[in-house]
Image (tube, rainbow, N blue to C red):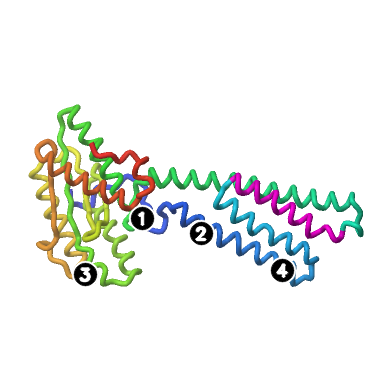
Amino acid sequence: MLGGSGAYHRREMPASEGPRSYAATRRLVLAAGLGVLVLLAAVMYARRVDTVEVLAVLLFIPMFLALVFKGLLGGALSAVAATVVYALLRSPAREAVGDGRFASLVLSRGVGYVAFGVLGGWASAQLARSLDKLEVYDQVDDATGLFNARFFVQDTGMELARAQRYQTLFSVCVVDVDASGLETLSRRRRAALLADLGAQMKAAVRSVDRAVHARDSAAHRFAVVCPETGSEGATIFVDRLAERLAAFLSTRGVPTAAADIRRTACTFPGDDGALQALRDQFAAIDRAENPDSGSRSGNGVS
């Protein structure tokens, strides 16, 4: 089980590739969009474009904020407001250009505002729903590329149902690496170390096993769901895994003795209470990491 021969048959995701929350994505979109609008207005001003037209471009800024935060309704209402403001800005030139040209000028600008507000608001709402759904169903830990706490709860639930239905067995092995040792490293070194620990875990398990990483307040918890594995095999595996991780950490500037790594191995059927306790702990980690989506993710512990 600890050999490196077992291929890990799932897509590996680097730490930087994890799903981005809507709040973080919204900040990124806001920064990029506002930067483009301000730059465009500055270029127009530098080229001595009519001041009213420069202000017309700047009117896209409150529209952009409205559609990002309020979606389609915010975009539509702000588009109407921007059209009215533009008409007021252009009203001094009404007598000079005539009613017909004035109306067509305001109409063309208003169509542009409405198109921007409505389409942008719709796109913002779609982005929010898509990222929210992605976050709800995310099963990959960004730091290590392993599965996350949510997956652990769901997967052990499925294994429990399978074991009860087909009278089979499975084991869960958990080793806890003290978080304080990793906190002494710089942020960059810690991120690299966690990614490498994920690779170590993938190399340590069979292709049928599922490796998990979760972080609570005190430890980095590395768990492995091992189908068709009895208690004796689970005990041997968890001890060897602790030794392997301790040796690896020591070579990376985090002196760790295998005896100091807390480990847990439980088998179902047999260790039903211990397994339920682990599921409760990982479910609590998932709720802490995803307070807004936990109620919709199907993480309920049975």
Number of disc labels: 4
**Quarter residue 222 falls in:** bottom left
Q: Quadrant of the C terminus?
A: top left
Q: Earlier in the sequence, mark 2 or mark 4?
A: 2
Q: Amino acid at mark 2?
A: Arg
Q: Secondary structure at mark 4?
A: helix
Q: CA distance from mark 4 to mark 3?
A: 53 Å
**Quarter residue 49 falls in:** bottom right
Q: CA distance from mark 1 to mark 3?
A: 21 Å
Q: Is residue 279 left or right of residue 30?
A: left
Q: CA distance from mark 2 to mark 4?
A: 24 Å
Q: Amino acid at mark 1?
A: Asp
Circles 1 and 3, Cβ within 8 Å, touching? The answer is no
Residue 27 disc label: 2
Q: CA distance from mark 2 to mark 3?
A: 36 Å
- Mark in front: 2 vs 3: 2
Residue 231: x and y in percent read 9, 43
118 versus 26 height, above or below: above
Residue 43 disc label: 4
Based on the picture, tell me whether residue 74 belongs to the magenta stretch.
Answer: yes
Q: Earlier in the sequence, mark 1 or mark 4?
A: 4
From the image, tell me which residue sits under label 3.
254
Q: Is residue 163 left or right of residue 13?
A: left
Outermost residue toward the top in this view: 165
